[in-house]
Image (spheres, rainbow, N blue to C red):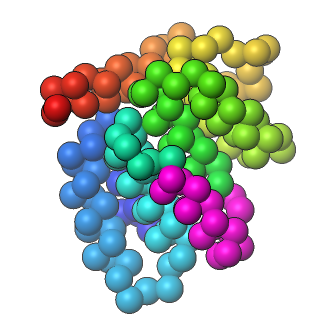
Amino acid sequence: MTQVRLALAVSFADPVRAQDELALAHQLLDGLDQRSNTLLAHTVALIKDAGTNGVTDRAQSLHTDIETAGLPFLHRFVELALAFHHAVRGEDQDTAATIGRLRALTATRDFAYFTDIAHFMAGLPLPGASVIRWTENEEHVRSTWRGLVQARQEHLRTRN
């Protein structure tokens, strides 16, 4: 479980390391009935691959798997991955739609920071006052998340 969370943490900033961490997570999960962690690992793979072709289709398939497994809390993670993907690709309409879905999924305020993060990644203003209290000032958090998007864009440019 911790290995999947480590892969999640590094997947935004370092897709190469995320691949290694994800491989280890799959190795540790192999043979275990850890459906939640397995699905989260698939979400990490989406984040690792953000900006490349096929991510949206894989996310749709993952949403179906999440429904089948009866683990609806994981939808928020998939939508956050999609927000990152769309921000990296500069897909403004898809980003807006994803933020709308995230807002609905976090209406109870559980994981409400995901909605703010999606705005930050896309360089969008928040629609109103945030309910989140960050450990750093909001501008620093915004800059950090936007920087991850820009770093991924640069990674994809230099890779091609």
Q: Which corner quadrant holds the C terminus?
A: top left
Q: Is residue 119 left or right of residue 154?
A: right
- Whether residue 106 is visible here, answered yes or no, is no
| Location of residue 112 by image quarter | top right
Q: Is residue 60 left or right of residue 140?
A: right
Name the foreground residue: 92 vs 129. 92
Q: Residue at x 35, y 83 (%)?
A: 30
Instruction: From the top left corner, tell me how far across and down residue 149 is, in percent.
Output: 40, 25
Instruction: From the top left corner, tell me how far across and down residue 101 is, in percent.
Output: 73, 40
Q: Is residue 153 left or right of residue 108?
A: left
Name the foreground residue: 113 vs 23. 23
Q: Which corner quadrant holds the N terminus?
A: bottom left
- Name above or below for residue 36 compared with residue 145: below
Residue at the extreme bottom of the image, as rendered: 31
Q: In the rendered structure, which segment of residues is drawn in magenta? A: 57-74
| Total marks placed | 0
Q: Residue at x 60, y 31 (%)?
A: 94
Instruction: From the top left corner, tell me how far across and down residue 118 is, in percent.
Output: 58, 29
Q: Is residue 63 part of the magenta span, yes or no?
A: yes
